[in-house]
Amino acid sequence: MEILEQFRNLISVENKFIKGWKHQNKPVLGYACSYTPEEIIYAGEILPIRVLGSLEPPKLADVYLPVNVCSFAKCCFDEALKGEYRLLDGYVVSNSCDNQNKIYDLWRHCTAINKTYFINTPHSSTENAIKFFYEELERFKEWLTKEFDVEISEENLKDAIGIFNENRRLLKSVYELRKRSPPLVSGSEALEIVLSSMMIPKDEHNKLLRVLLEENEKREDLPEKGVRLLVSGSVMGNSELFRLIESVRGCVVADDLCTGSRYFWNLVRENGDSTMAIAERYLCKIPCPFMYSSEERFKHVREMVKLFDVEGVLIFSLKSCDVHSFDAPLLAEELRENEGLPVSCLEWEHSLSGIAQLRTRIEAFIEMLEE
Amino acid sequence: MSERRLETLRGFYRNYVKPFYEVAHKAREEGKLVAWVASTFPVEIILAMDIIPVWPESYASLCAARRVSVPLCELAERKGFSKDLCSYPRCVLGSLFDGENLPEGGIPRPDILVASTCACDTHLKWFQVASRIFKKPFLLLDVPYNVESANAENLPDYYIQHYVSQLEDLISLLEKHSGIGLDEGKLRKTLELSSRASELWLKIQDYRKKVPAPMGAREAFSAVYFILCIPGTEQAVDFYERLCAELEQMVKQGIGVVEDEKYRLVWDNLPLWFDLQMFPYLRSLGAVVVAETFSHVWTGSLDPSKPYESLARKHLSNMSNCAIEGRIELIAGLVRDFRANGVILPTNWGCRMMTIGETVVKKKVQEMTGVSSLILDVDSTDWRNYDEYRVKTKLETYLKTLT
């Protein structure tokens, strides 16, 4: 379907919406982590876009960074050094992991982007943490207002929340299509749809999603049937790995990724103070593993497994991603022992170096499931 | 070149480390509450509540010094924990999975685990995993990352407030689990002792500014134990007083730890626990480590009239919790104050906090002080990739470039 291609083409910092936005002299802000409260940025008529790196192996970043560093964070930094993010008017990081935090130091020292901001995201969702995060978001709002000369009113925030929640509901409807067999959208297509939502104004994305949901009813070129898999991991900035899985008869029907379901699963409360509602949503969403407890995430995976009729789970840890690497054996054990599910834990590099070996292991896992 | 040993540190392991594990094991048997504590947690609270603290990080370094850490890391790796994770948790988690012949009868098991987010993700994740293994509660202090300033006086109020209110909640939980109320008087006393130990530790460092320096890294990485693990105790104050007295004598007599001191070095991050002979080897080349960043991140004066607030300020401004400027300023300051002519920056394979940005640290420190640094790709606990010959050659070559 043509609309699916449109989504794929939007996953680029050069896409037409970003260019159009810039053309209206409105700022674009890059962000590093799904804990960035995008609604606040958007409410100031600033376009938040996710920095997603590329498939190219880092070159310039190697001057600053050794090999034992998250290849995703390194890749994004490399792209910044190369000037690929020259369109960005600023860059925002959340206090989410050591890799990101420390590479943020390098962004400040070594890249041409001069407006940078660090959001101190707490690692827990207690009442204290939410109160603190609220203060932190108020401060972030002040920074945005001052640096970009914009206004962020309560009314603007309410509108932004409405648009973002609508996007989340629509994305959930897209995921619903994957419950069928064969699914009505493939894993790689679904990932591209979610990724594209981070790269354009959300109201525009909502329009595209409505078209997709309508057209999809008549879809004829359905994705291949295959072994129904859930993919768990951190960030996937493109759909190459999913395509690889699909090329060996895997059918990714669900995910637990920060660029997948964890990005949009939870809504923001639409009554009461907006900033407080945003603070609550981000701290109480399906947690990334840098948070105090991983139990809610594991529960989310177990629920997804049931909802999407999953036959096997692939857990991908980016090499040197500490927080996911600590969780991987625990999640695997829980799924194997409590759910009786086959699980394979794999380490990978964002640039997909060592892809042949990865393909062999994924294929062997799928073959085992086919038997 | 002959090397002088410090009297105060003689029998350190036998006198201080070993008894510590004996006490903790015995406490377990007697049903006292044992807590696993991560290094950036305000341990004064634990000490004031008579809870027995155990430091998994310390245990990992002990296993490395006893050369048993690698088989333990391998046990954890077999359970699926990545080789790229910090070797401390790999070693300690490994020891929980059928580790045999463990030093000091193994790490005492916890009834409760406490950590803060102050130093790194690893503390949180490691303790989370251990809490799952032991099925014991894990309490976390969520510490805002200090992006703006390493100055304890200059922190936003709501950072302090966040730390303090969490500490209050955490103390109630500890009271609930231990059945022991926190005695305010005892906390005040613990903070006073901690401050005193901190002052003495800084005084000890001051002696090392003298030329020749009366103490090196080998001693410092042992003696730091008190300020790191049991700062709020009479034992810490007593030990440091004795060490001060000895150093004062040495300085008066102009005795250095190395007879012919040629190079004065700053050592960043951790030592190679499995090869502590590295320091005597450096001394044989006339090089003495006069300061470690590790010796300068655990101190801080505490105001017993504002116990929680001063603990908050101390930990929020810990260099490990700060942006890279904190580390650069610390190292450059040490180079100047200790009249160092070289800096060793050992990486630690699984440590993102210290590995990332090392090239910037090297560059900035050189700009600020004119002193060059040597980056060593090593690991503190896991020696599988360690090539002693290569590291020594690098060090020798580096020393020759120093003036």
Image (cartoon, coloured by chain):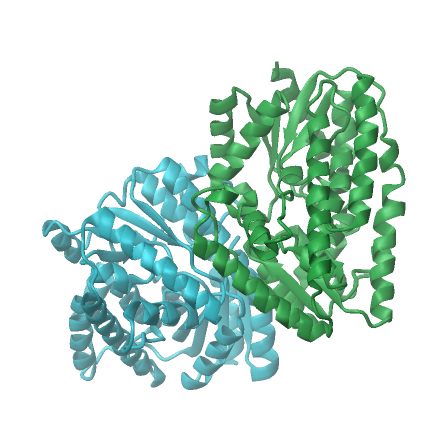
Picture residue at 84% right of the left edge, 36% below the top? B242
Q: Is any part of residue A249 visible from this angle?
A: no
Res A11 quadrant in image: bottom left
Residue A235, position as x, y percentages in the image: 41, 61
Q: Which chain is cyan?
A: A
Q: Where B373 falls versus A56 (above or below)? A: above
Residue A168, position as x, y percentages in the image: 28, 74
Residue toward you, B347 or A312 = B347
Residue toward you, A183 or B176 = B176
Q: Where A54 falls versus A36 (above or below)? A: above
Q: Is any part of residue B355 visible from this angle?
A: yes
Picture residue at 18% right of the left edge, 58% below the top? A45
Q: Which chain is green?
A: B
Residue B6, position as x, y percentages in the image: 85, 30
Classify residue A325 as left or right of residue B261. left
Q: Where B350 falls versus B99 (above or below)? A: above
Marker count (numbered): 0
Residue toward you, B313 or A201 = B313
